[in-house]
Amino acid sequence: MFGLTGFQRDLLVVASGLEKPSGQDIKEHVEDTMGTQVKHGRLYPNLDTLVERGLLEKGQLDRRTNYYQVTEKGALTIQEQLEWMQSQSKALPA
């Protein structure tokens, strides 16, 4: 998790909470949650990085739409980050 940017970690967590989301689904969820606009030129290269690192799996819904699904490695990475945050912060329950 430490080799990822904050934005990439956010994308991974968002994708893990959705059922086979498209890139557009992830984009909209991030925008709604964080209150900031995400440009396609930022979104898709970061999703591709997560796919290349084996944290997300990319599949095809139809000719124009891909979906993303968190891999076992991705889920483990999220869990490790959560455990690290809990061990470092007095504000989070252990």
Image (cartoon, rainbow, N blue to C red):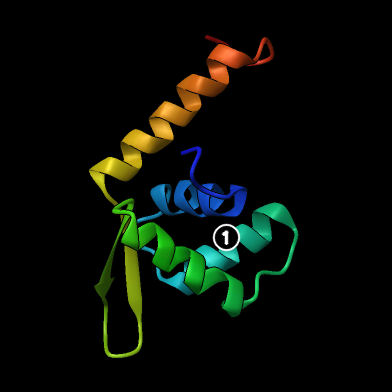
Where is residue 31 shown, x and y percent of the image?
66, 63
**Where is mark 1, residue-wise?**
29
Where is residue 12 shown, x and y percent of the image?
45, 50
Is 7 left or right of 13, judged from the image as shown?
Answer: right
Q: Which residue is drawn at 57% across and 50% down?
A: 5
**Number of numbered tags placed on the structure image:** 1
Where is residue 44 shown, x and y percent of the image?
49, 73
Q: Which of 58 and 1 is in front in this view?
A: 1
Q: Which of 3 and 56 is in front in this view?
A: 3
* Disc 1 crowd, CA 10 A, few/some/many (<14, 14-19, 20+): some
Q: What element carries label 1?
A: helix
Is 20 left or right of 6, judged from the image as shown?
Answer: left
| Picture layout, residue 62 above or below residue 22 | below
Is 9 left or right of 20, judged from the image as shown?
Answer: right
| Picture layout, residue 16 above or below residue 78 | below
| Picture layout, residue 5 above or below residue 65 | above
| Residue ranking furthest to the bottom | 63
Q: In which quarter of the image is residue 85?
A: top right
Q: Residue at x 24, y 42 (%)?
A: 72
Q: Which residue is drawn at 33% across and 51% down?
A: 55
Q: Nearer the viewer, residue 21 or 48?
A: 48
Where is residue 24 shown, x and y percent of the image?
50, 73
| Residue ranking furthest to the right | 35
| Picture layout, residue 32 above or below residue 1 | below
Given the image, on which type of amino acid does mark 1 rest? His
Is 61 left or right of 79, judged from the image as shown?
Answer: left
| Residue ranking furthest to the front | 3
